[in-house]
Amino acid sequence: MTRAEALAIVQEFTKSESLIRHAFAVEAAMRAYAEKLGEDAGLWAATGLLHDFDYDQFPEEHPYKGNQILTERGIDEEIRTAIMGHASFTGVARLSPMAKTLYAVDELCGFIGAVALVKPNRSLSEVSASSVRKKMKDKRFAAKVNRDEIIQGAEELGVEFDSHVEFVIQALRQVAVEIGLNP
């Protein structure tokens, strides 16, 4: 699957600018991890881009409706399985490195973005693993973000938490403007 194909699906189903920005953030983190691990960066990035494409129109059926749509369009099972696994409530096991990575970066990307938005310059350069940890302790901050899943994601990926956070911050800096932040 090409980026253009994945982006076309996202644009077809997603109208929320914040959700599109989140898709770009997860895409960037997935690409960075794929490159680091010697995996197919295009495949991983497309998976990150697509992971929430159905949420805008079908929030109560996400990611099940998305899986149905992607199946009907002949999208590879590896992509669909990773997307299903990023939502813990589906019960779909995260067995592949791509699936584990998607789970590990999804909530974290949103949280890092939220931390950057409250910084004076709305800049990712003002965000660090320690500032993310500090904000994670404040349950009122970005209250909808599941902190347990952020921690569990790093554990499942087998990476040290602070290193994981710093790696994702670096990946997001590459697309800062596209996700509404300063580098």
Image: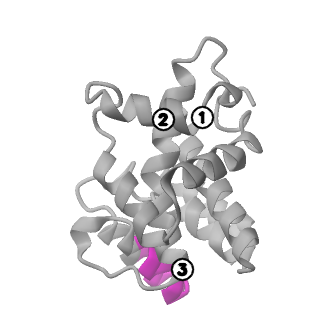
Residue interval drawn in magenta: 69-83
Which residue is found at the position 70% from the left and 76% from the top?
Answer: 37
Label 3: state its secondary structure. Answer: helix
- Identified by mark 1, the residue type is Ser
Which residue is found at the position 56% from the left and 48% from the top?
Answer: 165
Residue located beneath label 2 in the image: 132
Residue located beneath label 3 in the image: 97
Q: Percent from the top left, x then y, of residue 63?
A: 34, 66
- Identified by mark 3, the residue type is Pro
Category of crowding for the residue at label 1, using alpha-carbon neighbours closer than 10 angstroms: few (below 14), some (14–19), many (at least 20): some
On screen, residue 31 versus residue 154, left or right, reads right
Please tell me whether residue 129 is drawn above or below residue 103 in the rendered image: above
Q: Which of marks 3 and 1 is in front?
A: 1
**Nearest to N terminus: mark 3 or mark 2:** 3
| Membership of 182 in magenta stretch | no
Disc 3 + disc 2, Cβ < 8 Å: no
Q: Which of marks 3 and 2 is in front?
A: 2
On screen, residue 37 versus residue 99, left or right, reads right
Please tell me whether residue 166 is drawn above or below residue 180 in the rendered image: below
Q: How many marks?
A: 3
Residue located beneath label 1 in the image: 128
Q: Distance between the residues labelled 3 and 2?
A: 24 Å
Quadrant (top left, top right, bottom left, bottom right) of the N terminus: bottom right
Label 1: state its secondary structure. Answer: loop
Question: Can residue 65 be seen in this snapshot?
Answer: yes
Q: Distance between the residues labelled 3 and 1?
A: 25 Å
Please tell me whether residue 173 is drawn above or below residue 183 in the rendered image: below
Label 2: state its secondary structure. Answer: helix
